[in-house]
Amino acid sequence: MSKKLEGKVAVVTGASKGIGVAIAKDLAAAGAKVAVNYASDKAGADKTVSEIQAAGGQAIAVKGSVAIAEDVASIFNETVAAYGKVDILVNNAGVYAFQPLEEITVDEYTRQFGINVLGPILTSKEALKYFPAEGGSIVNISSVVAVSPSPGAAVYSSTKGALDTLTRGLAAELAPKNIRVNTVSPGLTVTEGGDTLGIRGTEMERNIIAATPLARVGQPEDIAGAVTFLASDDAKWITGERINAAGGLR
């Protein structure tokens, strides 16, 4: 891979597993120094850092919940202490749960919106303090369910719809600072989270594959490439956009 991100520093939230791991590794392979954020899975974050270092890249693990302002400040303080600045922010941390309307609780609503929507607001606000004068790139990880909700996913779909709107709003607001803000929206992707929900091998998975023109589920690496593109100068004229990384699924 060409070192299109040589000299850049990236913060990737929720990078201890799944799509976040692939994003952190892909950014590092492109030359970026990466802060691998985690909320609780230290072992997963340390493994990601070790794999990046073994491949010749630079990375550190930084702990913190994106839904807590003090934690967010710590994430960026540690990153800047190690690498001196921030050029790229990838808002990947996210949570989800699927339940019918009758079972939705205030606590579950608060949990999902706190991490999936408030989190990117807090991290973007903090990143503003450290982006260099020439600007930077924010990439939010959304989902195809933001525009094609499925039954039982009302809260999760709503958080991703809000994130898509946040992307467009911040893209307009931060453009004068040359900070680009874009969204990558995965379809069904093979991750630990999906395995926990028991999706693999089910009729739901088969139906999604049947509706996907490229006829398979995604791999974390499929998402990472789109993120690296948007983070790089290859996308210097792109902001406020939403890229579906979903094999044609809409």
Image: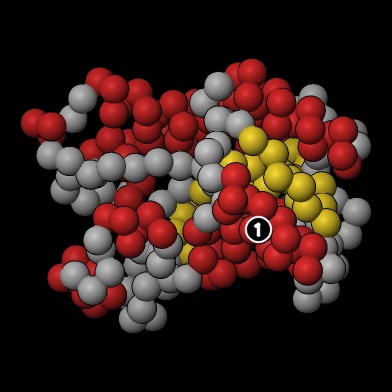
Residue identifier under label 1: 48
Report the front residue among 39 and 120.
39
Residue 24 seen anywhere in this rendered image of the structure? no
Q: Is residue 98 above or below residue 208?
A: above
Disc 1: CA contacts within 10 A as few (<14), some (14-19) or many (>=20): many
Residue 191 seen anywhere in this rendered image of the structure? yes
Q: Amino acid at mark 1?
A: Thr
Residue shown at 53% from the left, 70% from the top: 222
Residue shown at 26% from the left, 48% from the top: 149
Where is residue 92? Give x, y as percent: 55, 46
Q: Residue furthest front?
A: 43
Where is residue 140? Give x, y as percent: 56, 45
Quadrant position of residue 223? bottom right
Quarter of the image with the N terminus is bottom right
Residue shown at 19% from the left, 70% from the top: 202
Residue shown at 55% from the left, 30% from the top: 65
| In-image side of 222 versus 154 (left or right) | right
